Image (cartoon, grey):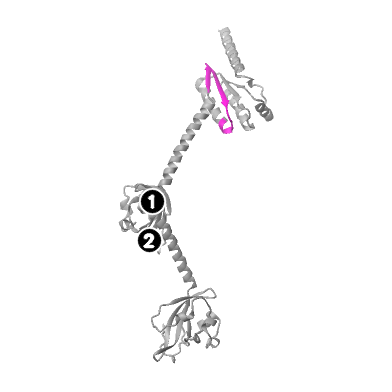
Amino acid sequence: MHTPREVEGSTAAHRVPFVLIGFDRELRVCEWNQRAEQQFGHSPEHARGRSIADLVPLAAGDWRDLWTDRDDAAPVWLSHADGRIFEWTVAPARAGDGVAHVVCYGADVTARAAATRASELEHVMLRVLVDNLPVVVCAYASDGTYLYVGGQGLAAIGLTSEQMVGKNPLEMFKDNPDSLEFIRRGLAGISTRMTIESLGRWWDSWHIPAPPTSRAAMVSMSLDVTEAHASERELRTKLDLIERQQRVIRELSTPIIEVWEGVLVMPIIGLVDSMRTSEIMDSLLQSIGRMRARFAILDLTGIEVVDTATANHLLAMIRAARLLGAEGILTGIHPGIAQTIVTLGVDLNGFVVHATLRQALSHCLAAAGDARHSGSKQS
């Protein structure tokens, strides 16, 4: 960069790859190059002698802040009224022992400023999350060595960043095959997520390969989910218990009673839907096969209404019992159930139906007596 020293040596004629503007203490423009004309739309002839504040209005800051008598003044960022941000490097142009004007070398850094601000915001957000959430964030070298370890989650395992940076987790967790495999996959460039137990805690962890140009080969974030894991396990235990209790309740609500040899009675009580009738059918058929029953009585006294699908299932039970060699008998049908069966248009010929359980049992006794009588005649 050329730093003007004398007024006589005008810098306006210098061809430089940036904006060049010179102004005196009253902010009157004395130098204005072609790049300034391209950026701000004023020719050198129009700009000279006018106020820089009028030619290039600012959204924030003041052109007077750029006045300096130092040759090593730090660059200044100014927000212009048109939304752009310029970085201005200022050099004094001296006349004798004083400064006649300053020359400002400018470059449009709007994109860089936006990227810098976004980076600063990302850093703040990451810092807030790491410092306040139960997480551990790590960066790894290509051989797995920790380059960075931080996060509030370290406190839960009694470790500090200083204790871990420089160590290799492949050695630290050599007795934990799941952790080793998890780390190796990440170092191999495979993004991986896993819920894993390590150092006495449960972690929901992500291993993510870093960009090739990064110093780190992989970054990871592990969220401490120990309490959530314990709650989930407790909930799962409770759900298993509830399911077992419901199974017992279902079995108690549809008991299969062998009233005497070869005769089973299944009283059905409570709400009956398609799922429950499927379970009832399975239980009944298993019992018929196991006890070699000749009669299976379905007592519907305990239910008043069923839908068409459930009615179909009940009738299908009778047919299935018949295939196993048992005679299926329906008893205690309420008027509402009778209407549903009629709506289905099912031909009840071949079905044995009795009003009460007592009548059904009498039917079974009579049928059994007839069978014995017929057997004695044949012998």
Q: Which mark is residue 182?
A: 1
Instruction: Please indicate, yes or no, whether residue 17 appears anywhere in the rendered image.
Output: no
Where 268 falls versus 84 (above or below)? above
Which residue is found at the position 44% from the left and 61% from the top? 125
Q: Residue tagged by mark 2?
A: 216
Quadrant (top left/top right/bottom left/bottom right) for the C terminus: top right
> Residue 107 versus residue 124: which sits nearer the camera?
124
Pointer 2 local density, CA inside 10 Å: few below 14, some 14–19, many at least 20? many
Count of labels in the image: 2
Q: Which residues are magenta?
A: 256-276
- Looking at the rendered structure, the secondary structure element under dot 1 is helix
Tell me where residue 355 sits by quadrant: top right
Asked if residue 55 is among those painted magenta in the image, a careful observer would answer: no
Name the amino acid, label 2: Ala
Q: Position of residue 282 (x, y in %)?
A: 53, 28
Tell me where residue 189 sits by quadrant: bottom left
Where 48 falls versus 311 (above or below)? below
Q: Position of residue 290 (x, y in %)?
A: 50, 22
Which residue is found at the position 58% from the left and 11% from the top? 369
Name the amino acid, label 1: Phe
